Structure formats: structure tokens, C-alpha cells
Amino acid sequence: MAVARLANKNGKTPETERVRASLNLTYFTRTSIMSAQDSERWREQLKGLTFDVFGTCVDWRSTVEEALTKEAATKIGSEAFGTLPPAIQVRVKSLTGQDWADFAQQWKTSYLRFTRSFVPGVTAWKDIDTHYYDSLVKLLDEWQLSGLYGPDEITQLSRIWHFLDPWPEASKGIHMLGTKFATASLSNGNQALQRDLKDHGDLGFHILISAEDFRAYKPDKAVYLGACKKLGLEPQQVALVAAHLNDLKAARAYGLRTIYVERPGEEEWAPGEEEYEQAKQWVDIWVAEGEGGFVEVARQLGIA
């Protein structure tokens, strides 16, 4: 009988549907194989790992908030506090833990504005230590706290960025990854700052690479490609590990591979936003918060 050859209401016969299903299966199978092969290929080529530092390797927020709160409490309890203008005494005593958290965020935001607006060869050079000092002076004035600290105290407080505590698994993960890959920091932080961070957190990088080395700041091309050159590798042999998708997007534009390690409060792009969702398609390794951080990166790269 010809019943099996009758078309359905959409004009499709059972035979054509079977052929279509077979073709779709073949397509998706081939696509999956090609995707797996591409994934395996870049992992085999990978020789070096560069790491963003602020927020990716170290928990700047908790450390800076604690330092600001503690320093204010110390000042309030000091004999010199009574010699300060009454308006400053009242002001600093009124500030809460949340206020100091907001202050810390504004301090960090000033760093982002500074580095992203920097134009090599046009903007006068300033390293990150100097920026953090200058921005602290400015913020204290904006918060009606100018005069609370003397110049030496401001210098000391601004150096808290040298002693940020690492994320719990960061040291272990970097040391693990260093058994198979060349590892390097790739931070806007100047060399002196990074040396202290490395020692303080036992971060274990084989080499420290700073944007300062190239007289530019991320996301400038010179920083990413300069890092590859310092490692003696081609961009496709190097991955950037970062907790910021915009940093990874810039690195990818210059040929580096991308490893995203989510950290609390660090991502600027929100889930559901177009750029965030698109990033899921191009990030090479995506480690969500709570999945093990750098230790999970090591596992995915074949290090037990």
C-alpha cells in the first residue's frame, strides 16, 4: 500500500522526515566533533597563563574595607583625635561600615576610570601607586574628611593595595598551574605593588608583568601583546585568566585564549545582558563562582 508514502498536513512524507532527521543528526554530530577537536587543539597549543590580579587573584574589597574601617577607629581612639576640627570629628564618627564599603568601591572605581581613559603617548604617565594616593586625597576631600590624616598616614593607608589578601584557593591553584605552564601576572598594578602582592599571598607567579612595563594600561593592545612577547610565546599559546569579561574580550581581540573565573562582586556585565550571554559562546573555560576557582582551571587543563 502507498499509505506510508502519504504526505502529512505540512507536505512532508515519513520518508522525507527520516532523511531530514538523519541529516540533522549527522550535522550535529559533525559539529560536536569539530567543536571538541578545536577545544583539544587550543589546549594542546597552550603554553602560558597570564593572570589579572585585582579581583581575580586577590580579594581587594574585603581587605580595603577592613583597612579603612580599622584606620578610622584607630584615629578616633587616638590622643590626636581631639585636636582635629569638630566638624571632622563628628563626620568620621557618623560613618558606618557600609559607608566605608562605599568609600572603598569609589576608590576602586577611580582606578578603573583612570586606566580606561589613559592614552599612551598622550596622557602623562602615572603609576598605580601614585594614582591610589592621589585618588585617596581627593576622596577624603569629597567625603568631608580632608585633614583627618596627615600625608604620611595617607601614604601608609594607600599602600593597603600592596597587601590584599588572596582568594582562598588562589595560591594553591597558581602553584598547580605552574607545574605545567609558564605563569605570569598581567596587571595594571606597578611592579613594586605586584611584588608585595605576590609575597603577601604566596601567589607563585614565574614572572611579574605589569602594564607599567609598556607605559600603557589594559585594555591597550600593547599590554596583552607585550605580555606574550615577554613570555616568548605567540598570542594563541597564551591565555588570560580573569574575573572580568571586558578584560577577556580585549585579550581575545588580540589572539589570546580566555579563561573566566567568576569572583563575588567583580563582574560588570550582568547575567541576561547581551554581552554577558554572548561571552558564554567565546570564553574557552568558564568557572562559575563556587566551582573551585584556579584549582578547577587546573583540573580542566589536565592537572590533578
Image (spheres, helix red, strand yellow):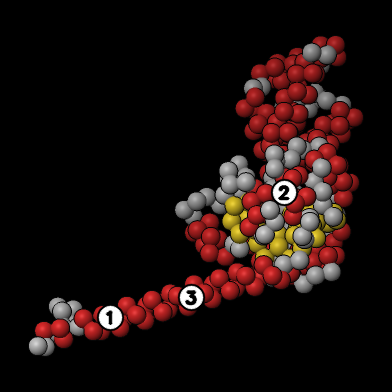
Name the image quarter holding residue 235: bottom right
Cα distance between the residues tagged 1 and 2: 50 Å
**Disc 1 marks which residue?**
18
Q: Mark 1 or mark 3: name the one nearer the start of the chain.
A: 1
Q: Residue at x 69, y 39 (%)?
A: 168
The amino acid on which the numbered mark 3 sits, given as a three-letter code, is Thr
Q: Which mark is residue 131?
A: none
Residue 31, labelled with which disc?
Answer: 3
Query: Badge 1: how crowded within 10 Å, few (<14), some, or many (20+)?
Result: few
Q: Position of residue 76 (x, y in %)?
A: 77, 15
Q: Residues within 10 Å of mark 2 (few under 14, many from 20)?
A: many
Relative to 34, is 179 on the left or the right?
A: right
- Residue type marked 2: Gly
- The answer to whether residue 299 is visible is yes
Say above or below: 259 vs 295.
below
Sequence-earlier tag: 1 or 2: 1
Residue 256: image x %, image y %?
70, 67
Q: Secondary structure at mark 2?
A: helix
User: x, y percentage for residue 3?
Assistant: 11, 84
Q: Residue at 84% across / 69% down in the picture?
A: 232
Q: Is residue 45 left or right of residue 209?
A: left
Q: Position of residue 184 (x, y in %)?
A: 80, 56
Q: Foreground: 241 or 215?
A: 241
Please tell me which residue is depicted at 54% across the width and 72% down the height of the picture.
Answer: 35
Above or below, 84 relative to 57 = above
Alpha carbon distance from label 1 to label 3: 20 Å
What secondary structure is marked by label 3? Answer: helix
The answer to whether marks 1 and 2 mark residues whose Cβ atoms lie closer than 8 Å is: no
